[in-house]
Image: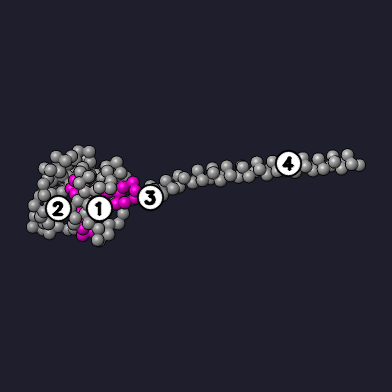
Amino acid sequence: MKMATSKGAGNHLALFFRWSLVLLLAAGLGCAAVEKKGAEQAPAAASGQVASQAPMEIPADVSCGKCGMFPANYPRWQSQIIFKDGSMTSFDGCKCMFNFLMAMDNFDKTHSADDVLVVWVKDFDSGAWINAVDAHYVVGSDMMGPMGKELIPFADSGAARKFHQESGGVMMQYADITPEVLKGMGMGGMKMKHGTKQMQM
């Protein structure tokens, strides 16, 4: 009888270890599933970053990153740079924005060109934000912006060509704009009128 009892106890002990092993394996698989789920959720955070690349609202009290004027007063001419850290610098015209980009260490001690995530400009016809790299620019026309001669962006090349034919200047792409181009534009007299008509801001 003693042997049978001992054998039964041994069976119970073996069963206990077997179930313990099963539970440990299940717990391990559960942890792996949680880790896998966490890994699968990572792209969701990345897609949140993509959403933050959208143009930001420019508050009334924020000044131009280059000249110190207030871009909110010139909605037609606004541009902005969004940095990888989520911050934004706004401008009252593309000329200020390009000058800032090409000599950033003169205006921003926190960021460098490598920190730029996206640059936004406004289509001159519709006022819609467009990626600066994709825009078609009319440079140095007789249309004066807040800081005089301007780089005027268009989403459509045909619209840019039409404006160029009517108002002069030179058609350029983003990659064509250099410090020499900007220097050649100067301040343009900082006139706020086009001909005898007051400009629409």
User: Residue 51 placed where, x, y %?
Assistant: 38, 50
What's the residue at 27%, 43% (across, down)?
Answer: 112
Under mark 3, the amino acid is Ala
User: Which quadrant of the figure has residue 157?
Assistant: top left
Instruction: Decide: few, some or many residues near mark 1? Use Cα within 10 Å; few <14, some 14-19, many ≥20.
Output: many
- Quote the CA–CA distance across marks 2 and 4: 81 Å
Quarter containing the C terminus: bottom left
1 or 3: mark nearer the eye: 1
Q: Residue furthest bottom?
A: 60
Determine whether the residue tagged by mark 3 lies in a helix, strand or loop. Answer: helix
User: Residue 135 placed where, x, y %?
Assistant: 24, 44
**Circles 3, 4 touching at the beta carbon (< 8 Å):** no
What's the residue at 24%, 61% (across, down)?
Answer: 61
- Quote the CA–CA distance across marks 1 and 4: 67 Å
Q: Label 4, on which residue?
A: 17
Q: How many marks?
A: 4
Return the disc, 3 or 4, that comes first in the chain's sequence: 4
What's the residue at 15%, 55% (across, down)?
Answer: 146
